[in-house]
Image: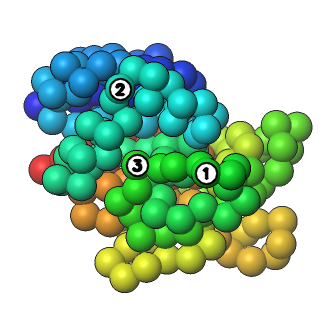
Amino acid sequence: MQVGVLALQGDFREHLNALTQCGVQGVEVRTPLELEKIDALIIPGGESTTIVSLAKTFEIFEPIKKRIAKGMPTYGSCAGMIMLADHIVAAKDGQETFGGIDITVRRNAFGRQVDSFESDISAPAISNSPIRAIFIRAPWVEKIGKGVEVLASFQGSDGASHAVAVRQGHLLATAFHPEITDDFSVHRYFLEKVCT
């Protein structure tokens, strides 16, 4: 199986390293031709509006959207979660996503860059042990549609519990960045459960 990492902006190198740690040689994806050669895709954290802009410049936005709609296994972390969400709260005017997961996310829900934090979270479907989660200008899920499985939740600054890891069929998304920790359980779950 060939796993690609969208390498337009953000922490794609860290995802490539995580794949290597899981025994998979990931490939950088920037063009429609490179997209055609992969079986699964990871959308990294970064800035969601910049990812959209660059994806359109590289003429890969619509091809990715179509591959996701046709069932390509895809995992998005942080900005990648926003890119896989069907709806966004606090979106920039005209902001688009690849879509696919029937969720509504709130951009920068946990605060600005200065509000970034780490925490251990429970995600029993992914790992028997707590997962180290790093939240950087992270979104959270405000609404969940039918068919969406919540894999982990976390209490937000509003005092409510919000989903921060979700799966819908061939799509997986986390609000946090497992790729910048030494815990690769999310990537293993994607490779072993979502991609099969």
Color encoding of the figure = rainbow
Q: Which residue is mark 2?
A: 59
Farthest residue, direction right = 114
Residue at point 42%, 36% (across, down): 43
Between the residue at mark 1 and the residue at mark 3, the CA separation in whole angstroms equals: 13 Å
Q: Nearer the viewer, residue 138 or 130?
A: 138
Farthest residue in the bottom direction?
146
Q: Secondary structure at mark 2?
A: loop
Alpha carbon of mark 2 to alpha carbon of mark 1: how far? 18 Å
Q: Would residue 89 be visible to someone looking at this image? A: yes
Residue 138: x and y in percent read 68, 48
* Label 2 – label 3 distance at C-alpha: 13 Å
SS of the residue under disc 3? loop
- Residue picked out by circle 3: 98
The answer to which of marks 2 and 3 sits earlier in the sequence is 2
Neighbours of disc 3 within 10 Å: few (<14), some (14-19), many (20+): many
Residue in the foreground of this view, choosing between 119 and 114: 114
The amino acid at mark 1 is Gly
Q: Mark 3: which amino acid?
A: Phe
Q: Nearer the viewer, mark 1 or mark 3?
A: 1
Q: Nearer the viewer, residue 69 or 115?
A: 69
Q: Element type at marker 1?
A: loop
Which residue matches tag 1? Answer: 94
* Marker disc for residue 44: none
Instruction: State which mark lies toward you, 2 or 3.
Output: 2
Residue occupying image coordinates x 62% and y 72%:
142
Residue displayed at 22% across by 19% down: 34
Is residue 155 positioned above or below 180 on the image? Answer: below
Q: Quadrant of residue 38?
A: top left
* Kind of residue indicated by mark 2: Glu
Percent across and percent down for residue 64 are: 30, 39
